[in-house]
Amino acid sequence: MTPPRASSPKNQPSTARKVPVRRAVVIGGGISGLASAALLARDGFAVTVLEQRTQLGGRAGSWERDGFRFDTGPSWYLMPEVFDHFFQLLGTSADEQLDLVKLDPGYRVYSEGYDDPIDLRASREDNLALFESIEPGAGARMAKYLDSAAETYEMAVRRFLYGTFQDFRKLAAPDVLLRMGKLARLLIEPLSTFAESAVRDRRLWQILGYPAVFLGTSPYAAPSMYHLMSHLDLADGVLYPKGGITEVIAAVERVARAEGAQIIAGAKVERIQVEGGHVTGVVHRDRRGAQHVAPADVVVSAADLRHTEMQLLDREHRTHDESHWKKRDPGPSAVLVYLGVDGPVPGLLHHTLVFTADWKANFGAVFGDDRHVPDPASIYVCAPSETDPTVAPRGSSNLFILVPLPADVGIGKGGLDGAGDYEVEQIADRAIDVVAERSGVPDLRDRIRVRKTIGPRDFADDFNAWSGSMLGPAHTLKQSAFFREGNASEKVEGLYYAGSSTIPGIGLPMCLISAEVLLKRIHGDTSTEPLPTPLERADGAPPRPQKRAPRRTPTTPLPPTKTPAATT
C-alpha cells in the first residue's frame, strides 16, 4: 500500500491555505543519495543534494586516462530486479535506462594448488553440472543448496530488506513463523559451515564462501542466511551494464534531476543545524570557500554514518558516542589497482577471482583479532575490456585489481604510476605478479601504460569512510537486519540516514533499497514489501518521460549550482 503523504493538500477545501513545500537536503551524491533525492522529489519535496566532490557516484566513481576508462569501485551488477524496481518506482525501467548484457561465463576462479581455472556459467543447470563434474554427488546437494538460497532470498526481499524494523509484529507473518526453525539455524551457523553441507572440494567450497566478502565480512563470521548470495551468481547469473557501473550512476542521476532534484557539486558539508531538537538546515562551503546554509525540514545523510554522527552533529544530538563505534566492525578496506595494459591478457574473464589455499590465515588477517596485510592474498580482477570495447583503446586491456585488507588507514594512500605510499605500492606489485602468473603473461609489468592505486587512507580522505572501509560496516550477525544501525536519528527529529552504513546494508542494490526504506520511514510505513510501482507523484501529474542520455565525461567536473534560498 502506498504510504500516506503527510503534506498532500488533496481533499482540502479551496479556501484552505496552501501547504508549503517541504524542503529536503541530502548529504552525499553517491547512489543512495541520488536515489533518495529522486524518490523524495517525486514525493513532493524540494530536494537539494550536496556532494563534496566534483564527481557524483561516491565510491562508484569513474576515472579516465589515455583512452582507458575505469570504474573506481563496484563492478558487479547483481540483484537486477532491485535496480528494475527502483526505476519502475519512477516510471521507467532498467531496460530503458541501461544496456545490460549477461556474462557467460559469469566469472572465473583460480585456486592455489590447481593449474586449471573453474568457469562459473550463467545458468543454474550448467553450474549444477559443473559442480557434479568436479565432485561426484555435489550436483544433487547443490540443487538443494540453491533451492534453499532462492527461498531465503525471496524471504529476505519479502520480509527483511524493504522493512524499517519499526514494528516487529510485521516479522511474525505466517511465512516467517513457519520457517522460524530454519531461520534460527541460518542466523546462528556460519556460512563456512553451512557451505560444507553441499560440497567438500576446497575450490567449490571457496566459490560458495567468497560472497561473504561482498557483505564486508568473512565466511567464518557471516551468518549462513547469506548463502542466499549463491542464488544471485549461480542461478540468476551476472549482468554487465555497457559502459560500466558509471552508467548506473548516470541513470540514477538522470531520474533524480527529471523529478526536480537539484544537485550541487563541490559542496563540503560542515554541520547539520539543529534547533529545538529538529533539523533546520545544513551548513556547507562551496568550491571558493564561501559558507552557505541550505534550509531544510528534512535532512538525509547518505554519507558515512559514523562521520555524520561524530563530525556533523554536536555531542548532544548524537545517537551514539565513540564508545558505541568501538564495539562495531567497520568492514574491510582494500588496495585497488587500475591498470591500462598493452595487448590482451588471455587468462582473464570479465570477472576473475584468485584464491589462496589457506583461507583461515587469509581471512584471519583481514577480519580476525590480529589484523594485518595478508601475504599471500586472495584477489579479485575485473577486466571489462573482455566484454566492453569502449573502456580501453583498441588492442589494449583494462584491468581493475582489488586486494581485500583490514580497515587501517595506516597502510597508506595510493597514487599515479607507482607514486603511492610504499606499502600500498608493494601490495599492488604483488597482486600484479599474481595476475601475470595466472593469466600467462610474464611480461605484464612491462606492458602497463597506465597505473593508479587507491589505499585505505584514500577511502577515509575522499569519502569520510570509517577507518578507511571500502564498503561499509560488516554484515556480521550483530550488524545485520534489525541489529544494524537504523535509518533515523534517535535524538534529532527530521534527520534520516541512507546508504551502506544503515539498513539494509552494503552494495549497490542495498543502497538503492535504503532510499525506498527511507521514504517509508518518513511516512511511518511499516510494511515489509517493496512499494507498488510506479510511485504516485505528489502533484498527481503523470510520470515524466525518461530517456537514456549520453554519459558525462567522468573527468569533467559537474557545474556548480546555487542553492535557492541559501544564505551566505
Image (tube, grey):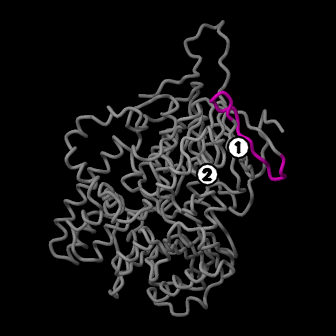
In this rendering, is residue 169 above or below 389? Answer: above
Name the secondary structure under disc 2: helix
Residues rendered magenta in the picture: 274-290
Question: Measuring 29% from the left and 61% from the top, which residue is drawn there?
Answer: 190
- The residue at which mark 1 appears reads as 271
Real-space CA distance between mark 1 and mark 2, rounded to the nearest whole angstrom: 11 Å
In this rendering, is residue 561 above or below 470? Answer: above
- The residue at which mark 2 appears reads as 307
Left of 80 or right of it: where is 522?
right
Left of 16 or right of it: where is 435?
left
**In terms of depth relative to the viewer, which is nearer, 264 or 257?**
264
Residue 159 image offset from top left, x and y in percent? 34, 40
Question: Measuring 56% from the left and 68% from the top, which residue is drawn there?
Answer: 408
Quick one: label 1 or label 2, which is nearer the N terminus? 1
Q: Which residue lies furthest to the front in this view?
A: 323
Q: How crowded is mark 2: few (under 14 residues within 10 Å), some or many (20 or more)?
A: some
Question: Measuring 53% from the left and 84% from the top, which residue is drawn there?
Answer: 432
Left of 380 or right of it: where is 358?
left
Q: How crowded is mark 1: few (under 14 residues within 10 Å), some or many (20 or more)?
A: some
